[in-house]
Image: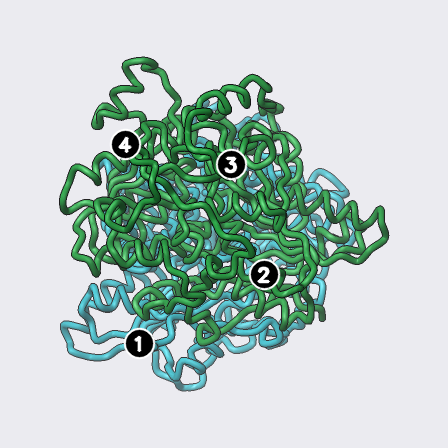
Chain colours: A cyan, B green
Amino acid sequence: MQRTKIILEEKDMPQQWYNILPDMPTPMLPPLHPGTKQPIGPEDLAPLFPMELIKQEVSQDRWIDIPDEVQDILKLWRPAPLYRARRLEKLLDTPAKIYFKNEGVSPAGSHKPNTAIAQAYYNKEAGIKKITTETGAGQWGSALSLACNFFGIDCKVYMVKVSYQQKPYRRSMIMTWGAKVVPSPSDETEAGRAILSVNPDSPGSLGIAISEAVEVAAKNEDTKYSLGSVLNHVMLHQTVIGQEAKKQMEIAGDYPDIVIGCCGGGSNFAGLAFPFLKDKFEGKKMRVIAVEPSSCPTLTRGPFAYDFGDTAQTTPLIAMYTLGHTFIPPGIHAGGLRYHGMAPTVSHLLKHKQIEAQAYDQLEVFDAAQMFARAEGFIPAPETSHAIKATIVEALKAKQEGTAKTILFNFSGHGHFDMGAYDAYMANKLENYPLPDEDIQSAIDLIKDYPKAE
Amino acid sequence: MQRTKIILEEKDMPQQWYNILPDMPTPMLPPLHPGTKQPIGPEDLAPLFPMELIKQEVSQDRWIDIPDEVQDILKLWRPAPLYRARRLEKLLDTPAKIYFKNEGVSPAGSHKPNTAIAQAYYNKEAGIKKITTETGAGQWGSALSLACNFFGIDCKVYMVKVSYQQKPYRRSMIMTWGAKVVPSPSDETEAGRAILSVNPDSPGSLGIAISEAVEVAAKNEDTKYSLGSVLNHVMLHQTVIGQEAKKQMEIAGDYPDIVIGCCGGGSNFAGLAFPFLKDKFEGKKMRVIAVEPSSCPTLTRGPFAYDFGDTAQTTPLIAMYTLGHTFIPPGIHAGGLRYHGMAPTVSHLLKHKQIEAQAYDQLEVFDAAQMFARAEGFIPAPETSHAIKATIVEALKAKQEGTAKTILFNFSGHGHFDMGAYDAYMANKLENYPLPDEDIQSAIDLIKDYPKAE
């Protein structure tokens, strides 16, 4: 019988993270201090992160050892299985071979714990007692709650209010592992109060929630901040995904022509894609596609520019694709993709044409989600379904061209906490939110006086 | 580093189901026709089930081949991993070794698809176009919807009303895979209307929902009925769990002194326990424990007697532990354990002291659930948490006795669709429902004129 999935043993888990920074074909623009406009140094990040993570953030080492204590927890669900989606192929009647890496097998149901465990570990090692963070759909918040629980660290999660309301059971999950959850904007922080004073009904955004979590960490000695995406060290920790997938594709006797991941802050995309991009930098031919929502089209329509990572302008200025740090995306169900910016690494790769970007509407994404759920059984998260949509598009293109492309996408998480969104979809209550051109212009206007990203 | 889990390859999957019937140390009492009071024959079951399943129901073959088509779908998640719960052991400070089989990895999140896939396959082979069934918490309904989707069979699920209301997202899951869901009691059937006319606010029960599903199947030529537990062929299909676990325990270099499963209709318990009981019948020493809720204490307090499997008395009379077919259990969150009866095989084994039974209250079960979630990461279903509670009790007993017992339990499913129950638990809103003695007496009175189970 044909094999459905490729499983690795625990002993085959990657022992090191892959750091893409030294392999970037062109140098990246540094983060800038918002006051001095000069490149920031490690000391600027020290109030927020433990030193080991700051070192990883700027490291030029290609390989960084994964501590035993981190691996020991990752083993609860890793290595994650690699699937051949034969039933989806058959349904599409495509000559393309479709593979996916199932990151939904973690206790939190997504790829997010890969970095949460590592970050909690380094904070614990640094003697930190408390971590604050933000979360959109709740996937990051639940992952960090899980991680902090393992290391005995208190955890407080500022959850984007619209998701807090839409996804009550993600919140329950966060609480089950012991973290506190606060809907954001909240009245607990200056950043939150400032937003609420202008708009008491603000649905919140990742940018606002980041501001709140950063503020609390910056003001408290024993508290650090943790970010679930965007930063270099987060991308780094996710590279276990792509490293495993490479081994598994080798066992399958295949290699992807196209690598696909959905993209909010960039971490699940980077986790799968970066280890493959290493091969691309060395001459291997492949397409690498980042997929985002049309309603929050950072990569496909935003300018590449220096901008803040958060609404309250507390982060350094980062060179990235951005819709402007005041942008509040429509309340689509893919809460994890509702971020105005993008990882600097991912942005840099797109700017320099090492990767491509595509955007899809909410409705066509849910069509793809349901098709996948019926073909392969597993119910995908709305975020993940963006990657599935792109995969289907590419598989149908392969059919049209009559080429047997090999496609690999990241199944970044399951949709068990998104069934309300599926309900709305089945009841024809979902909408598309195409972004008006004037919103793009607003972003450009907002950041026009910042240093140029050149 | 220590191994956390034992993974098998797809090629190591069991090729046959283990049928416990020929190995029973004492003969079982036959199901009786409610009219004639004589043992039923295959023809009595023919309106409800395809002939291949009826053959399996009465087969005396020890091993029955698993069709390739069934295995090919089981491979989407099987073999399921076997875990060593080292963090729970450490938390309990017990010398006991705790292992669990993770059946939560299936697309539906529980062990139920193991038999749903097989049943849908045999119905498809028999040319059946439509299947009806009942579901409690929704785990069985979602599993059958998934299975019918793979084989192109229409599926209708009568869902116990209290669960339909408590667990809306299980319902959404069932619908995502294409089945129709009806809250039971409904006005679609005579059985449902009869209940509603007496009690319009009836919360429903598995017994009522079975009556509805059976009625629809019996009245329609192209429609069959499917049961997610209780019957011999369902126990049979679940034995892939125990067979895999035996291989995995061997790889771990261990063998369980105690095997534990939660018990509603009996199928996840049987699936894990029966292959081990085969060894017990051959002289191996072990304890095998079935765990149920104190609020529905079929095995621990019900009489062993002939009774109906459903409320409307449409099934054969079955020799089993029972709380009476009119019993409506309190609305505990472990919806899958709210059944008045028990699998005849499991009942027979308890009656003849091959297994033990324990009952626990809802609150202590949720204490165990939260302890497990924090120790091992994975959030268990309320049903599963009964097995976890018993495991903790036995592990603490081992500590007290200073004996290094090896305990294996079945993690029958995750709790992603039960977070409302966790919410209630964390808000101190959960209650215990100890069963009054008069309810046991009512059961005895109800069935006193039925044939004696002797």
Quick one: label 1, few (<14), some, or many (20+) residues within 10 Å? many
How much space separates mark 3 and mark 1, taking CA atoms?
A: 55 Å
Residue A308 shows up from this direction: no
Q: Which mark is residue A406?
A: 1
- Chain ID at mark 4: B
Q: Amino acid at mark 4?
A: Glu
Give me the C-alpha separation between circle 4 and circle 3: 23 Å
Q: Amino acid at mark 2?
A: Phe
User: Nearer the observer, disc 3 or disc 1?
Assistant: 3
Disc 3 target residue: B321
Q: Between residues A104 and A317, which one lies in front from this camera angle?
A: A104
Secondary structure of the residue carrying numbered label 4: helix
Identified at 53% across, 40% down, the residue is B383
Do pointers 4 and 3 mark residues of a single chain?
yes
Residue type, mark 3 in image: Tyr
Residue at x 51% of width, y 24% of height? B444
Q: Secondary structure at mark 1?
A: strand
First of labels 4, 3 by sequence position: 4
Task: Name the residue tied to disc 4.
Answer: B212
Q: Is residue B212 above or below residue A362?
A: above
Of the two numbered discs 2 and 1 in the rendering, the one whose residue sits closer to the viewer? 2
Rendered residue at 26%/49% (across/down): B49
Comparing B159 with A152, the one in front is B159
Disc 1 chain ID: A
In front: mark 4 or mark 3? 3
Q: Is residue B425 above or below residue A380?
A: above
Query: For the N terminus of chain B, which image quadrant?
Result: bottom right
Q: Residues within 10 Å of mark 4 (few under 14, many from 20)?
A: many
